[in-house]
Amino acid sequence: MAKGYLITFEGLDGSGKSTQALKLKEALSRKGYSVVLTREPGGTPLAEEIRRVILTPTTEPLVPMAEILLYAASRAQHVENLIKPALAEGKIVISDRFIDSSIAYQGYGLGWDVEVVKAVNRMAVNGLMPDLTFFIDVSVEKALERIKGRQHRAEADRIESREMLFHRKVREGFIQLSKSDSRFVRVESEEHSIESIHRDIMEILQRKLNI
Ligand code: ADP
Ligand code: TYD
């Protein structure tokens, strides 16, 4: 049976991750691969419930540790009930966000101890790390501009309403992470079209994973 691969997309809200994840899924499916496209927080029914709890504004704000643990809880469900079984069947799993989002948002963004966030999430993924991670990089200004252009989504969640400084710290977190491990590929998205980024991604995939 073919070997399964876990490919993740990371970046700011509005960077273009979901667009690229979907295009990659379609391209690999056309090539005959069995592909599962999923997302975090979410991906299984219970993990999607946890997503709703995290992203729905409430009168009682989530304390930072509860936020870290809820993202990690949703990730643990996702890993055990969706990602690992699909990989065991030889499928390619593409996840729109994974462990690095917690390190960038809850660690670098919120300012929680990055080592604590990493430790909690190491338990959540239970040894499963991506084979390849595309960090789709844009400036905070461009990301917000793209979000404003999106009409089909309710964007008023608590995270996107946080101010620019927070997003700058998150971006810096992704930049640091992308330099720390060879599984990352940083893809510049500021001035590049959706199609040209997609072509670059296909070429990198061919070179790195031979798929
Ligand atoms: P994310 O999943 O990172 O939040 P999306 O993929 O939903 O971002 O993209 C946000 C918006 O920006 C969408 O309207 C999308 O069509 C647009 N977009 C994505 N990539 C590009 C690009 N390279 N150039 C211009 N617009 C883009
Ligand atoms: P997502 O659905 O990817 O939003 P978008 O498509 O707009 O990028 O993610 C929802 C929000 O959850 C997003 O603002 C990032 C945040 N998030 C974290 O803070 N930590 C995490 O571990 C994950 C997976 C997401």
Image (tube, grey):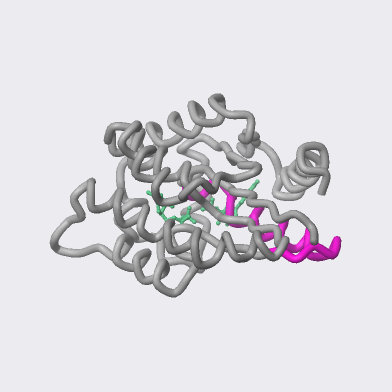
- Please tell me whether residue 181 is drawn above or below residue 85 in the rendered image: above
Does 111 lie within the magenta span? no
Q: Nearer the viewer, residue 121 or 205?
A: 121
From the viewer's side, name the closer residue of 133 and 190: 133
Total labels: the figure holds 0
Quadrant position of residue 133: top right
- Decide if residue 105 is on the left or right side of residue 33: left
Q: Main secondary structure of the magenta part?
A: helix
Furthest residue in direction left, as rendered: 60
* Residue shown at the point (47%, 46%) measured from the top left: 99
What are the residue bounds of the magenta stretch?
13-35
Q: Is 152 on the left-hand or right-hand side of 187?
A: left
Q: Residue at x 29, y 38 (%)?
A: 110
Front-lying residue, 47 or 12: 47
Q: Tell me where residue 73 appears, x and y as whole percent.
A: 35, 58
The N terminus, quarter of image: bottom right
Residue 160 image offset from top left, x and y in percent: 36, 51
- Residue 14 falls within the magenta-colored stretch: yes
Residue sitting at the far right: 31
| Side of 87 where 73 appears, left or right | left
Q: What residue appears at the point 65 percent right and 36 percent down from the top-left corner?
A: 187
Give the image location of residue 189, x and y in percent: 63, 39
| Residue depicted at 65% across the width and 42% down the height | 132
With respect to residue 63, does 41 lie above or below? below
Q: Position of residue 173 (x, y in %)?
A: 43, 31
